[in-house]
């Protein structure tokens, strides 16, 4: 069971600051790919629904582009919450998103090297 | 031969975008007697007024027509301009081509045609205008304030500060109004009593202020500067001049089962009572509906214990007649009756309360001494659900179409205070919108959410079902998460809409002051004259004019006092010369006009008339008191012989206008 307080502590985000305007979701460039959208992350963390979020593909679909953080009028920083949930997920044994063996198959020629490094950081323990 | 000038205003694009103003000026320039017709961008500007003044001098105009906005807006402006150029101000006519034309039409062709007709009508009328001279009437330098809540108190104090006598008429036994019932005020959380009661005491001690408590306005006559008001002083059966407010009678009275209205019936008081400890005047009042002595002559305990011998069971209502120059309406508000909202179970459960009841439940001077206990079993509530917009923004017969404005903030205050004092309490607020426009208001609301962790839920409560243990099942909607919430609550608090006090309508009738469909008093202009009624000499203070919170009420009360002082400092008022007059040769003394006159301006006298046979015949004829007549014109319509006519709006002028439109 992931704990709401744990997520809040890791991320440093206070979901109560959210005034539910939806600007984060409106600005999200990966909106179509996300099951849960940035405002839902904030709302669901506030209501302790961490497991649902952790089980969702949305955690990995987030581009970490920080558009939501940049534009939030209350400084809530939804991307940091998503990052915290992802961190919590990959910290768990056997929860690696990527296995080292799978990586070569995913590489294409256009992919910048930095993306690979990022993926290793973001998706593996 | 008349020489008439016509001036057509563009009002920026307000008129010019829909009306071809050049064509209007050109067309009207060809009307008989018109010697000059011009259009200009802003007729009311200095340049526009100078254009008019120059034309009056250059062409020796005998009449002026300005095609512009409503005469309520700028008639006075153009009359003043005409007067300064030597033209009698009552030779000016306004054709309203904005409110009655450009703003309501879209088609330029049609609107232009209508503007020409309206202009032609005004030209026809001005041909028959006669110069009028306004008379003067004196001003009684005393003001009446109806209602002794914070609005009335503030207005009275400010008027008294300027040195004028003020009387406050309050129907309750004490002044103080709703604010006296409130525990703390948003957004500063000041103690309401601590900031209100010193003002109440100031009123009592100010030698310019007379408080008529437990009194009502019974009749009003007269007009601006010269109102005559009859005040009914209801019998309180206690001599105000003798009672010391010791309160012994209120402790000894054996009739203990009287619902205490100050605590909204949440506890009981005695039949003789002082509403609350800081009441002004602090004197006891006997409630005749519950007093055994008054009902069946058996008791008399209060008279026995009263050391001041102030009790008088034989007291009668008395009446005071007083003259005033100005009258301020400060009749305030009440929460609406929410019995019709069955779904919230207000009448089924004691634990469903209104916000004002919660205010008393949390008040240190309230029924529980400031400890929040739910009414049914005096237990600490652990889960409290607040429901906003109960009856507000509700377009059916049960509620009010308007936003009551204060509920969002007082609910945030209640929620915050509860979380502060009882951190183990779960507090939910169901809202449709949270509206917090005001200095430090949104910050306050955000504090409730962010610091005090009040659960704000976007959505309404559908129904509340009482359980046998006193708890309440609340079915609500969480629209953001798209699901229904079912909450087991200990208490439900309903933010009931507010409405004008029921007494306001009869007062409006007595004052001939207009009201809107919700019984809020109408202001003379919603933006530019917000504290005056359209009826001259009647001023508006506080919620009687529209929902507002305490800071706004106090600001408006002071603004209102400023307007009253502006009136009372004048020694003379200019009368409206457009008053009725009777042609005594045509009058047959039938009294029709006297019966319809709302101002009592018409009297009759016997007058001798020389007959063809050289005898003198006595006949009864109508006389109009020009100082009292307000020029409403009711008598001119009622007069069967056509003797009664209105200066400036003569029958033949009206007919000329009709002819100009129809012929």
Image: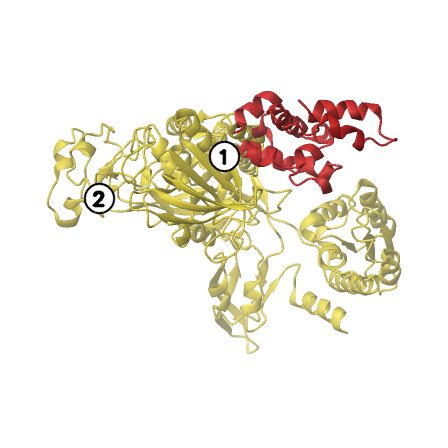
Up-down: is B306 above or below B514? above
Q: Residue at x 29, y 31 (%)?
A: B368
Q: Which residue is drawn at 14% across and 44% down?
A: B293
Q: Which chain is yellow?
A: B
Question: Percent from the top left, x then y, of residue A27?
Answer: 73, 36
Up-down: is A2 above or below B480? above
Q: What element carries label 1?
A: strand
Q: What is the chain letter for disc 2? A: B
Question: Percent from the top left, x then y, of residue B590?
Answer: 48, 71
Which callout, 2 or 1, points to the residue nearer the camera? 1
Q: Name the residue under label 2.
A: B315
Q: Which residue is drawn at 79% across and 42% down?
A: B45
Q: Which residue is drawn at 70% across and 50% down?
A: B75
Q: Can residue B176 be seen in this view?
A: no
Image mark count: 2
Foreground residue among B61 and B584: B61
Task: Give the crowd class for mark 2: few <14, some 14-19, many >=20 residues within 10 Å.
Answer: few
Q: Is mark 2 on a helix, strand or loop?
A: loop
Foreground residue among B104 and A115: A115
Question: Percent from the top left, x then y, of residue B60?
Answer: 84, 52
Figure quadrant of residue B334: top left
Q: Name the residue under label 1.
A: B455
Foreground residue among B162 and B188: B188
């Amino acid at each position: 069971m992931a704990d709401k307080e744990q997520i809040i502590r890791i991320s440093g985000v206070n979901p109560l600051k959210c005034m539910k305007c939806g600007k984060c979701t409106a600005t999200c460039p990966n909106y179509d790919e996300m099951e849960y959208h940035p405002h839902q992350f904030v709302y669901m963390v506030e209501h302790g629904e961490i497991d649902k979020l952790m089980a969702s593909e949305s955690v990995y679909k987030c581009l970490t582009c920080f558009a939501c953080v940049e534009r939030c009028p209350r400084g809530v920083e939804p991307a940091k919450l998503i990052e915290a949930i992802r961190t919590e997920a990959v910290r768990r044994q056997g929860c690696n998103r990527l296995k080292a063996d799978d990586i070569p198959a995913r590489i294409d020629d256009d992919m910048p090297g930095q993306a690979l490094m990022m993926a290793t950081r973001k998706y593996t323990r | 031969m008349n020489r008439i000038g016509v001036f057509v205003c563009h009002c920026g694009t307000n008129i010019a975008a829909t009306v071809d103003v050049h064509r209007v000026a050109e067309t009207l320039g060809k009307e008989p007697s018109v010697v000059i017709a011009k259009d200009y961008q802003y007729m009311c500007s200095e340049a526009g007024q100078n254009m008019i003044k120059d034309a009056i001098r250059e062409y020796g105009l005998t009449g002026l027509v300005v095609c512009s906005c409503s005469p309520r807006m700028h008639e006075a402006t153009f009359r003043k301009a005409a007067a300064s150029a030597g033209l009698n101000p009552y030779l000016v006519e306004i054709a309203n081509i904005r409110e009655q034309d450009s703003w309501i039409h879209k088609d330029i062709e049609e609107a232009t045609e209508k503007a020409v007709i309206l202009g032609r009508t005004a030209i026809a009328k001005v041909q028959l205008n006669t110069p009028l001279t306004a008379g003067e009437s004196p001003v009684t330098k005393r003001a009446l304030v109806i209602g002794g809540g914070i609005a009335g108190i503030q207005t009275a104090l400010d008027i008294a500060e300027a040195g004028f006598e003020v009387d406050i008429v309050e129907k309750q036994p004490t002044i103080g109004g709703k604010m006296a019932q409130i525990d703390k005020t948003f957004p500063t959380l000041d103690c309401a009593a601590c900031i209100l009661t010193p003002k109440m005491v100031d009123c009592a001690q100010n030698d310019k202020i007379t408080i008529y408590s437990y009194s009502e306005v019974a009749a009003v006559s007269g007009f601006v500067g010269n109102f005559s008001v009859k005040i009914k002083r209801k019998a309180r059966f206690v001599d105000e001049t003798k009672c010391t407010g010791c309160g012994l009678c209120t402790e000894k009275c054996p009739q203990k089962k009287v619902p205490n209205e100050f605590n909204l019936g949440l506890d009981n008081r005695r039949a003789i009572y002082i509403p609350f400890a800081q009441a002004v005047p602090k004197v006891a009042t006997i409630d005749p509906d519950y007093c055994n002595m008054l009902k069946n002559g058996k008791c008399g305990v209060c008279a026995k214990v009263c050391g001041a011998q102030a009790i008088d069971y034989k007291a009668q209502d008395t009446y005071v007649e007083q003259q005033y120059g100005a009258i301020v309406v400060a009749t305030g508000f009440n929460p609406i009756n929410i019995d019709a909202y069955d779904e919230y179970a207000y009448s089924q459960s004691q634990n469903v309360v209104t916000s004002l009841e919660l205010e008393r439940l949390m008040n240190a001077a309230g029924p529980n001494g400031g400890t929040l206990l739910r009414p049914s079993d005096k237990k600490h509530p652990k889960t409290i659900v607040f429901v906003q917009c109960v009856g507000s923004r509700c377009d059916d017969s049960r509620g009010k179409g308007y936003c009551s404005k204060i509920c969002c903030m007082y609910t945030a205050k209640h929620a915050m205070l509860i979380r502060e004092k009882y951190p183990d309490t779960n507090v939910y607020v169901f809202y449709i919108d949270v509206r917090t426009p005001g200095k430090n208001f949104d910050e306050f609301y955000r504090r409730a959410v962010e610091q005090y962790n009040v659960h704000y839920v976007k959505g309404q409560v559908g129904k509340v079902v009482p359980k046998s243990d006193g708890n309440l099942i609340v079915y609500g909607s969480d629209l953001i998460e798209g699901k229904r919430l079912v909450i087991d609550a200990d208490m439900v608090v309903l933010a009931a809409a507010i409405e004008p006090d029921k007494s306001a309508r009869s007062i409006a009738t007595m004052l001939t002051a207009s009201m809107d469909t919700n019984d809020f008093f109408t202001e003379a202009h919603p933006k530019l004259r917000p504290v005056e009624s359209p009826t001259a000499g009647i001023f508006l203070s506080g919620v009687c004019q529209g929902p507002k919170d305490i800071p706004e009420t106090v600001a408006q009360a002071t603004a209102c006092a400023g307007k009253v002082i502006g009136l009372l400092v004048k020694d003379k008022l200019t009368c409206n010369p457009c008053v009725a007059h009777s042609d005594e040769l045509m009058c047959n003394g039938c009294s029709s006009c006297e019966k319809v006159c709302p101002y009592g301006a018409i009297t009759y006298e016997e007058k001798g008339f020389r007959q063809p046979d050289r005898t003198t015949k006595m006949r009864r004829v109508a006389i109009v008191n020009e100082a009292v007549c307000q020029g409403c014109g009711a008598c001119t319509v009622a007069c069967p012989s056509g003797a009664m006519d209105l200066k400036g709006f003569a029958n033949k002028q009206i007919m000329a206008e009709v002819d100009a439109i129809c012929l």
